[in-house]
Image (cartoon, grey):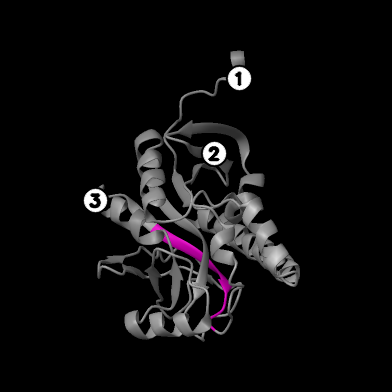
Amino acid sequence: MRGGVAPAPVPADVGIVAAMSMEVGYLVDQLRRVRKYHAASIPVIEGELGGKIVAIALGGMGRKSARLATSILLDGHRPSWVISAGFAGALSHSLNRYDVILPAEVIDLEGQRYSIDRPSSISGLGSEPRTLATVDRVIIDAAEKRRLHEETGADLVDMETSAVADICARRLVRFLSVRVVSDDARSDLPREVASLISKTGSYRIGAALRAIWNRPSSVKDFWSLQEQALEAADRLATFLVRCLSELPA
């Protein structure tokens, strides 16, 4: 390719919307014939895996970012399926860290509800349909997780899926969500977490340094979170690879 210019995007079999590169890094590592694009500041990685063309948009955190990333995927790559993939916090005590969940429904705090496809061809769906709540900020402590569970009846929480579901419903595109539990309902996250992650999903070095200065013991917390995130990402990638091969055309 002259000048390193990537060819125009081709129609994708599957489009994946994720907030952070960490969530799908292991999956990206398995793609072949990788091509990279940028549209409206959204990185899109296209490649081949399991006989399918896959396009991954890294939208950043929150509904607005997820909505933009989904629109870019649909406009540029025209996928047959869209998957909202990434980490989620557990609200139900029946879920454990590293569980991989395909929710049957997503709700938002405005009361909108969206059904989510759960194709019978995908193994490991679990017998109990789960509900995912999408909110606009990181849920830090166990008490707040309990309140959100009681108010919504949801089993887990994220910051993007309802926006992806809304766009797909409007444009009649088949949609599912794959979420790995990164923190269980009983656990408090370090209070610095909300300030450490930018809206793009990247870690803010300045915030991390301030947190360490103010609370030196937070270094241990950050290392633990990093290890847990890498394990969660590995579990997510393993399931997504299987999911891609089992999705109906």
Q: Which residues are magenta?
A: 176-185
Element assignment for label 1 = helix
Q: Which mark is residue 170?
A: 3
Looking at numbered disc 3 in the image, what kind of residue is underneath it? Arg
Number of numbered discs present? 3
Which quadrant would the N terminus be assigned to in this image? top right
Which residue is label 1 attached to?
Answer: 4
**Position of 154 compared to 6: left or right?**
left
Above or below — where is 30 with respect to 217? above
Q: Residue at x 60, y 13 (%)?
A: 2
Indicate the position of residue 62 as horizontal and vertical percent values. Answer: 42, 56
Vertical relation: 158 (above or below) 29: below
Check disc 3 and report its element: helix, strand or loop: helix
The verdict on residue 74 being magenta is no
| Chain-order first, disc 1 or disc 3 | 1
Pointer 1 and pointer 3: residues touching (CB < 8 Å)? no
Can residue 138 be seen in this snapshot?
yes
How packed is label 1: few (under 14 Cα within 10 Å), some, or many (20 or more)?
A: few
The answer to whether the residue labelled 3 contacts the one labelled 2, judged by CB atoms less than 8 Å apart, is no
Q: Identify residue type, mark 2.
A: Ile
Amino acid beneath label 1? Gly
Looking at this view, is 39 or 178 the one in front? 39
The residues bearing labels 3 and 2 have C-alpha atoms spaced at a distance of 24 Å
Label 2 sits on residue: 45
Q: Which is more toward the observer, 73 or 225? A: 225
